[in-house]
Amino acid sequence: AAAAGRSARAQLVIAVGGGSAIDAGKLAAVTILGEAPLDAYGLCATPLPARTLPIIALPTTAGTGAEMTRTAVFTNSHGHKVWAWGEELRPALAVLDPVLSATLPQRLTAWTGLDALVHAIEAATNRRANPLVSASALQAIRLIARHLGMAMDEPRNLEARGGMLMAAALAGSAIDNAGTGVAHAIGHAMGTHAYVHHGRAVALALGAALEANQEAAPRQHAEVAAALGVLPDDLVASYDRLLDEVEIGRDLADVGLGPEQTEAIYATTLGPENLPMLQANCRLFTEEELHELVATVLAG
């Protein structure tokens, strides 16, 4: 993409698609005028170029909130799922047009919607949360609770699609300011080892960690429960039911993941690219507890 941009003498980058497409556009915008290879920007190893192109983002999925963030995720030349970060990666303009997401298949509507939900829950409950972050995150949760089922059942319902796009943008803004947590650490590790949809991975990982997280941060999770319209005591069970209702697919054999990958994914979860997420989580899991979480997710 960067090579094409240089060839065309591009003056801006318009990124249309899901989170991966938008991240690719964001990364192209900062590398077109730069001299370093993309790998150099992973984990902030090298500062982003001083001169970059403006970015316009048009999401066609309601999940990552990439149109709102200063982060872009990519697979480096060593096969690791890593991130670049910097103000230069934030789009100058985000266009939320529900028509663009109206043809998204039901399963991807569910998985991307769950990604937005996990973003919001982790941002509202982690160690970096604050009242401004929580305001965005909790409103995202309310919108998802209201619109996800409708968007799945009535894909061309533009009110539902618009509500989900706004939720994803709000959740994206929340994680841009507070980060995520353990579910994303595990989910990113899964994505390094297999072609598993990110929303599916993080949703399953949060399901494994939610009860322990709630014990560590009961007040914040009570606010999450209220935003979902359930009692705090019902939060874990309600979240579990939601995963079943959208038919998330707990058995990951279809993407080549199972208990035999536990050690590899556990080791990657502890990698430098995932440690910031682990350290931000409301509960600091011991290595033994983290290993158990990974094993629970992979057991299906």
Image (cartoon, grey):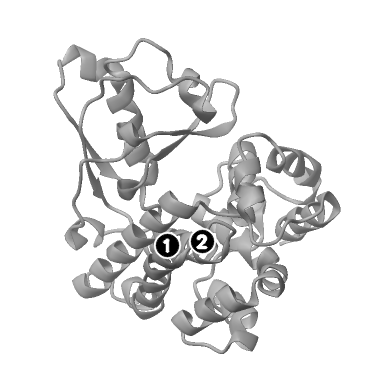
Q: Is residue 99 left or right of residue 129?
A: left
Q: Position of residue 216 (x, y in %)?
A: 70, 69
User: Which of these two is toward me, 63 or 129?
Assistant: 129
Asked whether disc 2 touches disc 1, contact meaning CB atoms under 8 Å apart, the reply is yes
Residue 1 numbered tag: none
| Mark 2 element type | loop
x, y (%) of residue 259? 79, 51
**Residue beneath label 1, please?**
133
Q: Looking at the picture, does residue 119 appear above or below residue 255?
A: below
Quarter-of-image position of residue 218: bottom right
Relative image position of residue 180 (x, y in whole percent): 54, 54
Q: What type is the residue that disc 1 sits on?
A: Val
Secondary structure under tag 1 reads: helix
Q: Position of residue 207 (x, y in %)?
A: 64, 67
Q: Residue at x 33, y 78 (%)?
A: 150
Residue visible at 60% across and 22% down in the picture: 78
Query: Which residue occupies 59% across, 78% down?
Result: 219
The residue beneath circle 2 is 129
Residue toward you, 49 or 241 = 49
Q: Quadrant of residue 116?
A: bottom left
Cα–Cα gap, marks 2 and 1: 6 Å
Q: Residues within 10 Å of mark 1 (few under 14, many from 20)?
A: many
Q: Residues within 10 Å of mark 2 (few under 14, many from 20)?
A: many
Name which residue lies at 31% across and 40% down: 90
Q: What is the three-letter code of the residue carrying label 2?
A: Ala
State the quadrant of the N terminus: top left
Give the quarter of the image for residue 172: bottom left
